[in-house]
Image: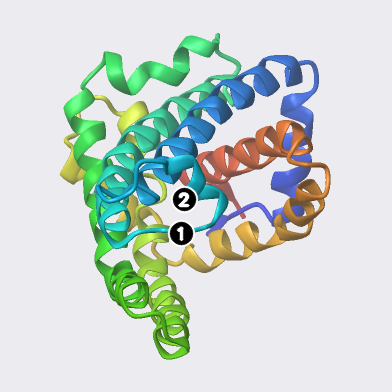
Amino acid sequence: MNQYKKRWQLKNAAKDKLVGNYSEAVLLTMIYGVFLIANSVINTFVMYYSPDKENVLLSILLAEITPTGYVMGLGISLVLGILLNMLKAGVSLFYLNMACGQSYSIRDLFQAFREHPSKYLLVSLVILLVQFFFALPGYACDYFYLMNPSDQWMVLSYICRIVGQIIVLPFTLAWAQSFRLLLDYPSVSAVEALRKSRQLMKGHKGRLFVLQLSFLPLEIAAIFTIGIGYLWLSPYINMTYTLFYLDLMNPQEA
């Protein structure tokens, strides 16, 4: 019978793996963070855009999101989200190499753009489109709110977003290992990686979800450090998720 590690064992092992390696991990977090900030800035400028307004900065200061900008922002957000997901694959490689005692470097971040980019692109596209589909009712409510501001549309938006997140969660958890499987088995196709991830996560989606929730107090605490705490928290979380994957692939015999 297979015996899987408990949360505290995975977390303790993650701390041990990061000893002496934190400087590189923090640097990777900073570089990846630059892309996240760039994504946020681009989306902000687009969502406040309107052909009828000349001063976008004034619209941002007045918090006047426009219907035109909102629709354009959703499209651009989807494209940028795909690119960010491909960078996430590089983050996964970085921590897989570190966890397995292999050489690792910041160059790992761009692995998905160097080797078989179409595979990572397809996996990222499938995951984001599924997430977008279930979030669509919430986006529609937001659009109608912008067209005709009403508390009713705002309440409906929140309800749709919460329901959408609940429905899409099993899909997200099931495909959580897709990028790592592509990295471990370069010969598999994108569809096979998604399928293998779903099989691998059978009976373990709840475990991963609880593991994700266990980091919530630390993430809230990091917010009060103006995000600086994430430089150390993000490596800890990523390494824990990496060890979770390795434990799934090679569980101990009870």
**Residue 203, placed above or below residue 245:** below
Residue 19: x and y in percent read: 80, 22
**SS type, badge 1:** loop
Q: Is residue 209 visible?
A: yes
**SS type, badge 2:** helix
Give the Cα distance between marks 2 and 1.
5 Å
> Which color mode does the image show?
rainbow
Q: Residue at left 41%, top 28%? A: 87
- Which badge, 2 or 1, comes first in the chain's sequence? 2
Q: Is residue 124 left or right of residue 30?
A: left
**In the image, what residue type sits under mark 2?**
Ser
**Residue 13, placed above or below residue 32:** below
Which quadrant would the C terminus be assigned to in this image? bottom right
Find disc 2 in the rendering and name its residue.
59
User: In this figure, what is the number of numbered marks?
Assistant: 2
Q: Residue at left 82%, top 52%? A: 221
Q: Are marks 2 and 1 in contact (CB under 8 Å)?
A: yes
**In the image, what residue type sits under mark 1?**
Glu
Residue 51: x and y in percent read: 25, 47
172 and 10: which is toward the camera = 172
The residue carrying pointer 2 sits among few (fewer than 14), some (14 to 19) or many (20 or more) residues within 10 Å by Cα, namely: some
Q: Residue at left 47%, top 87%? A: 151
**Residue 4, placed above or below residue 83:** below
Residue 46: x and y in percent read: 35, 44
Find disc 1 in the rendering and name its residue.
64
Q: Is residue 164 left or right of residue 24?
A: left
Q: Is residue 191 left or right of residue 16?
A: left
The residue carrying pointer 1 sits among few (fewer than 14), some (14 to 19) or many (20 or more) residues within 10 Å by Cα, namely: some
